[in-house]
Amino acid sequence: MSEKETKSTEKTEAEKCKEQLFSKPKHAGLILSDEKIKKADKFCEGYKHFLNSAKTEREAVAYAVSAAEEAGFVPFEKGKQYAAGEKFYWVNRGKAIILGVMGSEPITCGVRISAAHIDSPRLDLKQHPLYEDSSLAMLKTHYYGGIKKYQWTAIPLALHGVVVKADGEKVEVKIGEDEGDPVFCVTDLLPHLAQDQMKRTLAEGIKGEELNILVGSRPFKDDKASEAVKLNIMAILNEKYGMVEDDFISAELEAVPAFKAQDVGFDRSMVGSYGQDDRVCAYTALAAILKCDAPKITALTVLTDKEEIGSDGNTGLDSYYLRYFIEDLAAAFGANPRTVISASECLSADVNAAFDPTFPDVIEKRNGSFANFGVVMTKFTGSRGKSGTSDASAEFVGRVRRLFDRNKIIWQTGELGKVDHGGGGTVAMYIAKMNMDVIDVGVPVLSMHAPFEITAKLDTYMAFRAFKCFFEDNEK
Ligand code: MN
Ligand code: MN
């Protein structure tokens, strides 16, 4: 080796200084061993299966219940003093679930919560949805959550949900998922005749009342009947589900993309699927509690509904159901629920927007999050001067930062877009309302809220590890 080469490998004072003082984000693919990467890929096989079997909040709850029971969780009993290590779950109206593992420390030390949401943007059927126009049978919808309406046309849709019939019987509907099932579709205008439509703004390109789903086109065989196509559809629904038109009134039917979760990229490094906001955090937070065996502090995973429409409603986290649950848990030990809640900590497990090189203008690069750079810790969300958010304290950010570093979690920070470029919220502010420390931790997502969203597998695996160490690590 020549003298010149020796010198070039020696670090200068400035280089050494820089190494010590500057933050250095690094691609998870460069940090993790091949073995760990394989583990992450394998973990995401289970994740894809979850995405395909749980496209609605109700289906996610059903999935969580069966996985929990298999892992030894039993239905929560009010008033029972749970012993350390005992596992329980409680379902709220079939649309939200709390899973817990009792800690060895007294309940007055608080609980640790990972809270993700299992509702995703979609098209809900209206209460009088079915009509016939020009010999086509259609369904009227009202979109749920923040969508770019034009993205929901001309893609195959499946219909999921429940119908409560006049006599109270509840029928489950799931059509468009199995091989051989028919699918449904919102039609769009051909470009040849879209001259006027093309002049509309992107937001108005497809209007809310134009999100009509095509569901049939053949008439009931009777020349005298009017609305014969609609009648034919109603006859099919009656035969299959025993329902009549008025049963739509007491139904929750959700149209979601019919396609399946798939690997994305030549390198298969990403997952593309509907509903990854926030099922990527729901799956990882669920996996973390299922694998949590003997925590010191009682651990809870909450999978909640209604986040996409502002957490309102009795299955959303702006309701008191989580507070009541912790109060019941505390009451069994004669503990003051306020003491328990105020000593508790929460990771609000929700996604953030990953930096998209095609749209670089909306994210300030120094503070944005990037796919494959690990789980994102988001101190605040909201909009217009941090309005509508829980801005986590420096102390709690410091606590979570130390936790992640100790456990070799690959993590990054993020913010939801440039200042005054829009924004959004999570359940964090509703958790904070209870006087709990809380911060958003989740996975960066590309094309968030689109029918086909994209995440990086290594980030998903890191989210699982992050929630798991939050439950299990007891150093402060
Ligand atoms: Mn979300
Ligand atoms: Mn969302």
Image: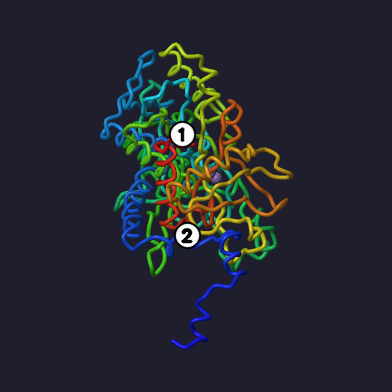
SS state under label 2: loop
Residue drawn 58% across the image and 73% down it: 12
Q: Is residue 28 above or below residue 1?
A: above
Residue 418: image x %, image y %?
A: 68, 54
Comparing 127 with 5, the one in front is 5
Q: Is residue 334 above or below residue 364?
A: above
Residue 258: image x %, image y %?
A: 40, 51
Q: Which residue, given by chain and number where applicable, does mark 2 sit on?
A: 372
Could you classify mark 2 by the number of other residues whose Cα lies within 10 Å: few (under 14), some (14-19), or many (20 or more)?
A: many
Q: Is residue 142 above or below residue 183?
A: above
Q: Earlier in the sequence, mark 1 or mark 2?
A: 1
Residue 474: image x %, image y %?
A: 43, 35
Is residue 215 found left or right of 149 in the rendered image? left
Ligand 1 within 8 Å of the CB at mark 2: no
Task: Give the amino acid at mark 2.
Answer: Asn
Residue drawn 45% across the image and 60% down it: 28
Q: Mark 1 or mark 2: which is in front?
A: 2
Q: Is residue 349 above or below residue 361?
A: above
